[in-house]
Image (tube, helix red, strand yellow):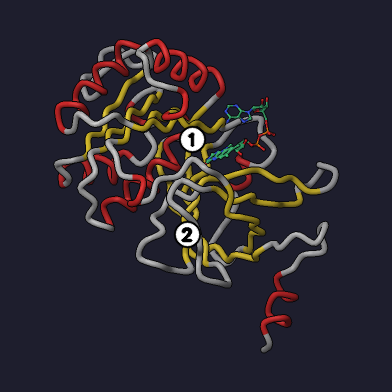
Amino acid sequence: MSSNEFFQRWLAPDKGRLWLVATVVGVRPECSDATTLRLELPVPADFVAGQYYLVRMRIDGAPGVVEQAYSVSSSPWPPSSKIEITIREIPDGRASPLLARQVGEGDQIHLHGPFGSLTWNEADGGPLLMIGAGSGAAPFASIVRFASARHSTVPMALLCSSRDRASILFREPLEELDRCQDQLSVIHTFTRSPRDLSAHFHRRIDASMINEVIGKLSSWDPAPLSLLIAGPLEMVASARQACQALGIEGGRINYELHA
Ligand SMILES: Cc1cc2nc3c(=O)[nH]c(=O)nc-3n(C[C@H](O)[C@H](O)[C@H](O)COP(=O)(O)OP(=O)(O)OC[C@H]3O[C@@H](n4cnc5c(N)ncnc54)[C@H](O)[C@@H]3O)c2cc1C
């Protein structure tokens, strides 16, 4: 097959944009309200840890097609044609309940991408502080997994805000990486489970919490840190404000809204 024939096969007639037809090769529950889909792409996946794809689908009762963004939660290393995306179900949403509950192995999903600049690569160095809430943990799972796969020694901390223990995204894999990697610290805050002592904090992310986590990172490496923030608008806005109040320059803060 010529390369032109190959791409014609995967080019959906949509404004000339290239949509990859990926096949679902695995489905697993990730936490109480999220599901991870393992997708096989028709070409090697070529993304940087932290990037996302647009997912397109036709939904019964909805006009046209729905496109939503989903971060890759798996590592780009070692190279592979398989990626994972993790969908947190929004009960009244159009796309997420379908993707989280009704997609099965063998189904095909249209993807466009990758996109996004909320990324980390080895050349970026560190120390690195990642702050995530809700689906904002997904790009950071990719970054932490990538750093581990590359045996990186860059100090990293991931501050995750969840309602409670059952709704932590990637709890087991992140806890495992935290145990095995001296330079990684995964820190949880619960917003609705005040008595669960498996979290370090029990409130929304604020300046004093960020300062405490920065103190831990700085004790490993006093170099100026970089910050990545992802999640719902309210959390991203307050975390950015908190960082700026702590004197962290805007240029060192990169963020992504997940709504
Ligand atoms: C760059 C980027 C990366 C993203 N990565 C992920 C990811 O890895 N995993 C993931 O699950 N989602 C991710 N999202 C969010 C995702 O794109 C969808 O917005 C989400 O799945 C809801 O889509 P829906 O069609 O189900 O809801 P919609 O039909 O669009 O919305 C239904 C209702 O839910 C509200 N709503 C929409 N999104 C959210 C939200 N995130 N939280 C709370 N309420 C919401 C809307 O205001 C509306 O009231 C990402 C978004 C962006 C922009």
Q: Secondary structure at mark 2?
A: strand
Could you tell me which quadrant the C terminus lies in? top right
Q: Amino acid at mark 2?
A: Ile
Which residue is tagged 1?
135
How crowded pointer 2 is (Cα within 10 Å; few <14, some 14-19, many 20+) is rated as many
Mark 1, secondary structure of its residue: helix
The residue sitting at 53% across, 33% down in the picture is 256
Distance between the alpha carbons at the discs numbered 2 and 1? 17 Å
Is 218 left, or right, of 238 in this rendering? left
Is ligand 1 within 8 Å of the beta carbon of the residue shown at mark 1? Answer: yes
Which residue is the extreme one toward the right? 63
Please give the residue where the numbered disc 2 appears in the rendered image.
83
The location of residue 35, given as percent across then percent down, is 48, 45
Q: Tell me the quadrant of the picture where the N terminus can be found.
A: bottom right
The residue carrying pointer 1 sits among few (fewer than 14), some (14 to 19) or many (20 or more) residues within 10 Å by Cα, namely: many
Q: Residue at x 46, y 23 (%)?
A: 250
Sequence order check, earlier mark of 2 and 1:
2
Task: Point out residue 241 in the picture as x, y percentages from the top left corner.
Answer: 46, 14
Tell me which corner region of the image, top left, top right, bottom left or bottom right, holds residue 212: top left
On screen, residue 115 above or below 149: above
Amino acid type, mark 1: Ser
Q: Nearer the viewer, residue 99 or 80?
A: 80
Q: Which residue is found at the position 55% from the left and 67% from the top?
A: 41
Where does ligand 1 appear, by image quarter? Answer: top right
**Above-or-below relation of 196 to 176:** above
Cβ of mark 2 under 8 Å from ligand 1: the answer is no
Identify which residue is drawn at 46% across, 19% down: 240
Horizontally, residue 21 falls left or right of residue 253, namely right
Q: Nearer the viewer, residue 212 or 21?
A: 212
